[in-house]
Amino acid sequence: MEKKVILLLWITAGYLGALMPGRKMGRKALPVKYFAHRGLYNNSGSAPENTMAAFDRAVKAGYGIELDVQLTKDEEVVVTHDFHLRRNCGIEGEVDQFTYEELQRFPVFHSKERIPLLEDVLKRIDGKVPLLVELKYKEGSRICEKASQLLDLYKGTYMIESFHPQVLLWYKQHRPQVARGQLSMNYQKNKGWFKPQYAIMRGLLLNFLTRPDFIAYDCRNGYSLSLQICRHLYGCPAYGWTVKNKSQLRKVKKYFDGFIFEGFRPASGPGD
């Protein structure tokens, strides 16, 4: 019996040690409570996701902005979410199969907008609202290197985040002063992905290596034990993504410190 207790203590200690995040931020250090997911967008209108028009709307409303970056064929850093262009541009092929100039031929969701350069987005926002920059990782560290070169020159407030732990490791080593966030979710329930690496990432068990300063977790899975241990034991702030209406916001509010939202405007205002 004593051996079982000792083993259980070792397992518990190992689990808690694996979850240990970074220490740069506390919940009171969050720049804003609400980030507009891919801008304050409307994909059936004139301001589709991750475009200048959507970012202009978010700035005007005073919300923080969450956006996604990846590389083109000619290694320009562009702001767009999907690796594939089918959904947003109706084109067969992936972003990194086209140069930036070639991408400018494709309307985003049948609007007048085009996929923008991160450099141009940063100039447009110009520090007016905080940014949450998700790095879309494929292979190698080029997206980290190229994005950081632009963000190093940016005078506004920003944080980075990624689903891929390699991005956080790169920032931990090369840009430790930049707040970094681990994106995660219940991959088994919401995606049907059952490989071991997804169980590890769902449980935030690489925190001891990546030392995230905040967690961004699927708001549908806010009850996650690992997430709540990070929040309550280690004081690590958590953002819930992607909240899609006021009713859902009310249901998940107890699990998170801030929110990434779309499809509505939080009634209590961006600064709450």
Image: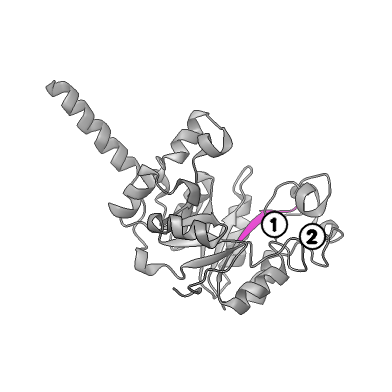
Between disc 1 and disc 2, the foreground one is 2
Which of the 4 image quadrants contains residue 103? bottom right
Neighbours of disc 2 within 10 Å: few (<14), some (14-19), many (20+): many
Q: Is mark 2 on a helix, strand or loop?
A: loop
Residue 124 locus on image (x, y percent): 67, 76
**Residue pictured at 79% horizontal, 58% vertical:** 109
Magenta span: 67-72
Residue 207 locus on image (x, y percent): 39, 45
Label 1 and label 2: CA atoms lie apart by 10 Å
The answer to whether residue 123 is visible is no
The quadrant of the image that shows the C terminus is bottom left
Report which residue position mark 1 lands on: 80
Q: Is residue 170 magenta?
A: no
Q: Is residue 69 magenta?
A: yes
**Residue pictured at 39% horizontal, 54% vertical:** 255
Is 229 situated above or below 191? below
Is 7 situated above or below 242? above
Question: Which amino acid is tagged 1?
Answer: Thr
Residue 250 locus on image (x, y percent): 45, 60
150 or 262, nearer to the observer: 262
Tell me if 89 is positioned left or right of 217 in this view.
right
Question: Which amino acid is tagged 2?
Answer: Val
**Residue pictured at 50% horizontal, 67% vertical:** 34
Tell me if 32 is positioned left or right of 117 in this view.
left
The quadrant of the image that shows the N terminus is top left
Tell me if 63 is positioned left or right of 212 in this view.
right
Is 75 situated above or below 39? above
Q: Main secondary structure of the magenta part?
A: strand
Report which residue position mark 2 lands on: 108
Neighbours of disc 1 within 10 Å: few (<14), some (14-19), many (20+): many
Q: Are the residues at dot 1 and dot 2 in contact (C-beta closer than 8 Å)? A: yes
Which of the 4 image quadrants contains residue 200? top left
